Image: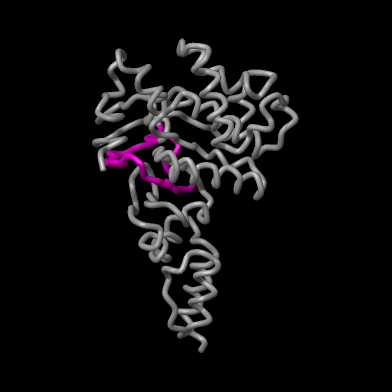
Amino acid sequence: MSTMLQTEKLEYSYPALEEGEEQTRALRGVDLTIEKGSFVVVLGHNGSGKSTLAKHFNAILLPMGGKVWVEGMDTVDETRLLDIRRRVGMVFQNPDNQIVSNVVEEDVAFAPENLGVPTEEIRRRVDDALGAVGMSEFARHAPHLLSGGQKQRIAIAGVIAMEPACIVLDEATAMLDPVGRQEVLTTARRLNREKRITIVLITHHMNEAEDADRVIVMDNGKIAMDGTPQEVFARVEEIEAIGLTVPDTVQLLYDLRRNGVDVPLSALTVDECADAVAAALK
Protein backbone atom coordinates (compact mmCIF):
# COMPACT_ATOMS: atom_id res chain seq x y z
CA MET A 1 0.00 0.00 0.00
CA SER A 2 1.18 3.53 -0.73
CA THR A 3 1.25 6.39 1.76
CA MET A 4 -1.68 8.78 2.10
CA LEU A 5 -0.59 10.90 5.07
CA GLN A 6 2.76 11.25 6.78
CA THR A 7 4.13 13.35 9.62
CA GLU A 8 7.72 13.62 10.76
CA LYS A 9 8.69 15.10 14.13
CA LEU A 10 5.51 17.21 13.96
CA GLU A 11 5.34 20.04 16.51
CA TYR A 12 2.56 22.53 17.17
CA SER A 13 1.78 24.99 19.98
CA TYR A 14 -1.18 27.30 20.50
CA PRO A 15 -0.38 30.90 21.46
CA ALA A 16 -0.79 32.04 25.06
CA LEU A 17 -4.21 33.49 25.84
CA GLU A 18 -2.76 36.21 28.05
CA GLU A 19 0.54 38.02 28.20
CA GLY A 20 3.02 36.26 30.42
CA GLU A 21 1.44 32.82 29.97
CA GLU A 22 3.26 30.02 28.20
CA GLN A 23 2.15 28.61 24.86
CA THR A 24 0.14 25.39 24.97
CA ARG A 25 2.21 22.66 23.36
CA ALA A 26 -0.30 20.46 21.54
CA LEU A 27 1.92 18.16 19.45
CA ARG A 28 5.33 16.91 20.53
CA GLY A 29 7.35 15.32 17.74
CA VAL A 30 4.68 13.12 16.18
CA ASP A 31 5.91 10.54 13.64
CA LEU A 32 3.04 8.87 11.79
CA THR A 33 2.31 7.19 8.46
CA ILE A 34 -1.23 6.38 7.28
CA GLU A 35 -1.62 4.12 4.26
CA LYS A 36 -4.08 4.66 1.41
CA GLY A 37 -7.33 2.76 1.73
CA SER A 38 -7.00 2.19 5.48
CA PHE A 39 -9.54 2.93 8.22
CA VAL A 40 -7.71 4.54 11.13
CA VAL A 41 -9.24 5.66 14.43
CA VAL A 42 -7.41 8.24 16.56
CA LEU A 43 -8.43 8.18 20.23
CA GLY A 44 -7.59 10.47 23.09
CA HIS A 45 -9.04 12.56 25.88
CA ASN A 46 -9.62 16.31 25.53
CA GLY A 47 -6.31 18.09 25.13
CA SER A 48 -4.44 14.99 23.95
CA GLY A 49 -3.63 16.54 20.56
CA LYS A 50 -5.86 14.37 18.37
CA SER A 51 -7.88 17.20 16.80
CA THR A 52 -4.77 19.35 16.37
CA LEU A 53 -3.22 16.44 14.49
CA ALA A 54 -6.34 16.10 12.32
CA LYS A 55 -6.22 19.76 11.30
CA HIS A 56 -2.69 19.27 9.95
CA PHE A 57 -3.91 16.65 7.48
CA ASN A 58 -5.40 19.20 5.09
CA ALA A 59 -3.33 22.22 6.08
CA ILE A 60 -5.89 23.97 8.28
CA LEU A 61 -2.91 24.15 10.65
CA LEU A 62 0.70 24.20 9.50
CA PRO A 63 3.63 22.67 11.41
CA MET A 64 5.66 24.80 13.80
CA GLY A 65 8.27 22.10 13.63
CA GLY A 66 8.69 18.97 11.55
CA LYS A 67 6.78 18.11 8.38
CA VAL A 68 3.41 16.91 7.08
CA TRP A 69 2.92 15.35 3.65
CA VAL A 70 -0.32 14.50 1.83
CA GLU A 71 0.42 12.00 -0.94
CA GLY A 72 3.94 13.37 -0.94
CA MET A 73 2.85 17.03 -1.07
CA ASP A 74 4.36 19.25 1.64
CA THR A 75 1.53 21.10 3.40
CA VAL A 76 3.61 24.27 3.77
CA ASP A 77 3.92 24.52 -0.03
CA GLU A 78 1.30 27.17 -0.85
CA THR A 79 1.28 26.17 -4.52
CA ARG A 80 -0.09 22.73 -3.55
CA LEU A 81 -2.72 23.92 -1.04
CA LEU A 82 -5.71 23.50 -3.36
CA ASP A 83 -4.50 20.03 -4.40
CA ILE A 84 -4.12 19.06 -0.73
CA ARG A 85 -7.62 20.31 0.14
CA ARG A 86 -9.04 18.34 -2.79
CA ARG A 87 -7.31 15.17 -1.66
CA VAL A 88 -8.24 15.41 2.03
CA GLY A 89 -11.77 16.39 3.02
CA MET A 90 -12.67 17.37 6.58
CA VAL A 91 -15.94 16.73 8.44
CA PHE A 92 -16.24 18.55 11.75
CA GLN A 93 -18.16 18.13 15.00
CA ASN A 94 -21.13 20.38 14.24
CA PRO A 95 -22.74 19.67 10.83
CA ASP A 96 -24.61 23.00 10.98
CA ASN A 97 -21.26 24.77 10.57
CA GLN A 98 -20.67 23.01 7.23
CA ILE A 99 -24.13 23.34 5.70
CA VAL A 100 -24.36 26.51 3.61
CA SER A 101 -27.48 26.09 1.44
CA ASN A 102 -31.23 25.79 1.97
CA VAL A 103 -31.59 22.68 -0.20
CA VAL A 104 -29.64 19.47 0.35
CA GLU A 105 -28.46 18.95 -3.24
CA GLU A 106 -27.37 22.58 -3.52
CA ASP A 107 -25.29 22.18 -0.39
CA VAL A 108 -23.58 19.07 -1.75
CA ALA A 109 -22.88 20.93 -5.02
CA PHE A 110 -21.29 23.91 -3.25
CA ALA A 111 -17.69 22.66 -3.12
CA PRO A 112 -17.44 21.32 -6.70
CA GLU A 113 -19.02 24.54 -7.99
CA ASN A 114 -16.32 26.54 -6.24
CA LEU A 115 -13.68 24.26 -7.73
CA GLY A 116 -14.96 25.11 -11.23
CA VAL A 117 -16.30 21.63 -12.00
CA PRO A 118 -18.53 21.60 -15.16
CA THR A 119 -22.30 21.58 -14.55
CA GLU A 120 -22.95 18.06 -15.90
CA GLU A 121 -20.10 16.68 -13.81
CA ILE A 122 -21.47 18.43 -10.70
CA ARG A 123 -24.85 16.76 -11.27
CA ARG A 124 -23.17 13.35 -11.45
CA ARG A 125 -21.08 14.00 -8.36
CA VAL A 126 -24.05 15.22 -6.30
CA ASP A 127 -26.14 12.18 -7.25
CA ASP A 128 -23.26 9.81 -6.53
CA ALA A 129 -22.41 11.48 -3.22
CA LEU A 130 -25.99 11.43 -1.94
CA GLY A 131 -26.28 7.80 -3.00
CA ALA A 132 -23.05 6.95 -1.20
CA VAL A 133 -24.39 8.24 2.12
CA GLY A 134 -27.92 6.88 1.61
CA MET A 135 -29.54 10.31 1.33
CA SER A 136 -30.74 10.41 -2.32
CA GLU A 137 -34.40 10.68 -1.33
CA PHE A 138 -33.64 13.87 0.62
CA ALA A 139 -32.05 15.75 -2.30
CA ARG A 140 -34.76 18.43 -2.39
CA HIS A 141 -35.23 18.67 1.38
CA ALA A 142 -34.23 21.58 3.61
CA PRO A 143 -31.17 20.57 5.67
CA HIS A 144 -32.41 22.26 8.84
CA LEU A 145 -35.36 19.84 8.96
CA LEU A 146 -33.10 16.78 9.08
CA SER A 147 -31.88 14.90 12.16
CA GLY A 148 -28.35 15.36 13.45
CA GLY A 149 -27.16 12.11 11.90
CA GLN A 150 -28.75 12.99 8.55
CA LYS A 151 -27.14 16.44 8.60
CA GLN A 152 -23.75 14.89 9.23
CA ARG A 153 -24.28 12.49 6.33
CA ILE A 154 -25.05 15.51 4.12
CA ALA A 155 -21.83 17.14 5.31
CA ILE A 156 -19.98 13.94 4.36
CA ALA A 157 -21.71 13.95 0.95
CA GLY A 158 -20.46 17.49 0.40
CA VAL A 159 -16.92 16.25 1.01
CA ILE A 160 -17.42 13.18 -1.20
CA ALA A 161 -18.52 15.44 -4.07
CA MET A 162 -14.97 16.82 -4.10
CA GLU A 163 -13.84 13.23 -4.83
CA PRO A 164 -11.17 13.12 -2.09
CA ALA A 165 -8.80 10.24 -1.53
CA CYS A 166 -9.11 10.70 2.23
CA ILE A 167 -11.82 11.89 4.62
CA VAL A 168 -10.95 13.04 8.14
CA LEU A 169 -13.87 13.02 10.58
CA ASP A 170 -12.85 15.27 13.44
CA GLU A 171 -15.16 14.35 16.36
CA ALA A 172 -17.92 14.13 13.75
CA THR A 173 -20.09 11.92 15.99
CA ALA A 174 -19.59 13.87 19.23
CA MET A 175 -22.86 15.84 19.06
CA LEU A 176 -25.03 12.98 17.82
CA ASP A 177 -27.34 10.56 19.60
CA PRO A 178 -26.56 6.82 19.32
CA VAL A 179 -28.71 6.43 16.19
CA GLY A 180 -27.06 9.37 14.43
CA ARG A 181 -23.63 8.17 15.48
CA GLN A 182 -24.29 4.75 14.00
CA GLU A 183 -25.52 6.32 10.73
CA VAL A 184 -22.26 8.23 10.34
CA LEU A 185 -20.07 5.26 11.27
CA THR A 186 -21.90 2.96 8.85
CA THR A 187 -21.44 5.54 6.09
CA ALA A 188 -17.73 5.92 6.81
CA ARG A 189 -17.15 2.18 6.82
CA ARG A 190 -19.04 1.74 3.55
CA LEU A 191 -17.03 4.50 1.86
CA ASN A 192 -13.84 2.85 3.00
CA ARG A 193 -14.91 -0.63 1.96
CA GLU A 194 -16.60 0.16 -1.36
CA LYS A 195 -14.74 3.24 -2.62
CA ARG A 196 -11.43 2.59 -0.83
CA ILE A 197 -11.44 6.11 0.56
CA THR A 198 -8.94 6.46 3.38
CA ILE A 199 -10.84 7.23 6.60
CA VAL A 200 -9.30 8.90 9.64
CA LEU A 201 -11.83 9.02 12.49
CA ILE A 202 -10.98 11.25 15.45
CA THR A 203 -13.10 10.29 18.45
CA HIS A 204 -13.27 9.69 22.19
CA HIS A 205 -15.87 6.92 21.84
CA MET A 206 -13.94 3.67 22.31
CA ASN A 207 -16.54 1.44 20.66
CA GLU A 208 -16.19 3.38 17.39
CA ALA A 209 -12.77 1.78 16.98
CA GLU A 210 -13.92 -1.85 16.99
CA ASP A 211 -13.90 -2.29 13.21
CA ALA A 212 -10.87 -0.12 12.45
CA ASP A 213 -7.78 -1.42 10.69
CA ARG A 214 -5.68 0.50 13.17
CA VAL A 215 -6.09 2.43 16.42
CA ILE A 216 -3.81 5.30 17.46
CA VAL A 217 -4.04 6.59 21.03
CA MET A 218 -2.85 10.15 21.66
CA ASP A 219 -1.73 11.44 25.05
CA ASN A 220 -0.05 14.75 25.91
CA GLY A 221 0.69 15.52 22.26
CA LYS A 222 2.37 12.19 21.56
CA ILE A 223 1.37 8.79 20.19
CA ALA A 224 0.97 6.57 23.25
CA MET A 225 -0.22 3.41 21.46
CA ASP A 226 -0.53 2.24 17.87
CA GLY A 227 -1.84 -1.10 16.64
CA THR A 228 -4.90 -3.14 15.77
CA PRO A 229 -7.98 -2.66 17.98
CA GLN A 230 -7.28 -6.05 19.58
CA GLU A 231 -3.67 -5.11 20.34
CA VAL A 232 -4.48 -1.67 21.75
CA PHE A 233 -7.52 -2.53 23.86
CA ALA A 234 -5.77 -5.51 25.43
CA ARG A 235 -3.57 -2.93 27.21
CA VAL A 236 -6.36 -2.14 29.68
CA GLU A 237 -4.23 -0.83 32.54
CA GLU A 238 -2.17 1.45 30.27
CA ILE A 239 -5.32 2.88 28.70
CA GLU A 240 -6.84 3.55 32.10
CA ALA A 241 -3.60 5.17 33.29
CA ILE A 242 -3.95 7.92 30.67
CA GLY A 243 -7.55 8.61 31.58
CA LEU A 244 -9.39 6.57 28.96
CA THR A 245 -11.67 3.55 29.18
CA VAL A 246 -11.83 0.41 27.08
CA PRO A 247 -14.99 -0.82 25.30
CA ASP A 248 -17.55 -2.39 27.64
CA THR A 249 -16.91 -5.82 26.17
CA VAL A 250 -13.19 -5.65 26.93
CA GLN A 251 -13.87 -4.31 30.44
CA LEU A 252 -16.15 -7.29 31.12
CA LEU A 253 -13.53 -9.76 29.89
CA TYR A 254 -10.81 -7.98 31.87
CA ASP A 255 -12.87 -8.20 35.07
CA LEU A 256 -13.56 -11.89 34.43
CA ARG A 257 -9.84 -12.56 33.92
CA ARG A 258 -9.02 -10.86 37.21
CA ASN A 259 -11.46 -13.25 38.86
CA GLY A 260 -9.84 -16.32 37.39
CA VAL A 261 -11.97 -16.89 34.27
CA ASP A 262 -9.83 -17.76 31.24
CA VAL A 263 -11.17 -15.44 28.52
CA PRO A 264 -9.29 -13.53 25.80
CA LEU A 265 -9.22 -9.72 25.78
CA SER A 266 -9.39 -9.70 21.98
CA ALA A 267 -13.16 -10.28 21.72
CA LEU A 268 -14.33 -6.72 20.95
CA THR A 269 -17.84 -7.05 19.55
CA VAL A 270 -20.82 -8.08 21.65
CA ASP A 271 -21.16 -11.38 19.75
CA GLU A 272 -17.45 -12.19 20.10
CA CYS A 273 -17.59 -11.34 23.79
CA ALA A 274 -20.66 -13.52 24.35
CA ASP A 275 -19.03 -16.44 22.53
CA ALA A 276 -15.83 -16.06 24.57
CA VAL A 277 -17.70 -16.02 27.87
CA ALA A 278 -19.90 -18.98 26.86
CA ALA A 279 -16.84 -21.00 25.83
CA ALA A 280 -15.07 -20.23 29.12
CA LEU A 281 -18.06 -21.26 31.21
CA LYS A 282 -18.60 -24.61 29.52
Q: Does the magenta stretch include residue 119?
A: no
Q: In this view, does 262 lie above or below 84?
A: below
Q: In this view, does 80 lie to the left or right of 139?
A: left
Q: Nearer the viewer, residue 268 or 60?
A: 268
Which residue is the extreme one toward the right? 145
Q: Is residue 79 left or right of residue 55?
A: left
Query: Percent position (x, y) of residue 156?
Result: 54, 32
Q: Nearer the viewer, residue 74 or 89?
A: 89
Q: Which of 99 and 61 is in front in this view?
A: 99
Task: Residue at 54% x, 36% y: name it.
Answer: 132
Query: Percent position (x, y) of residue 170?
Result: 49, 37
Query: Percent position (x, y) of residue 128?
Result: 53, 29
The span shown in magenta is 24-53
Task: Residue at 71% x, 37% y: name it.
Answer: 147
Q: Quadrant of residue 10?
A: top left
User: How is this picture coloured?
Assistant: one colour
Query: Percent position (x, y) of residue 180?
Result: 64, 44
Q: Is residue 67 left or right of residue 134?
A: left
Task: Residue at 54% x, 30% y: name it.
Answer: 129
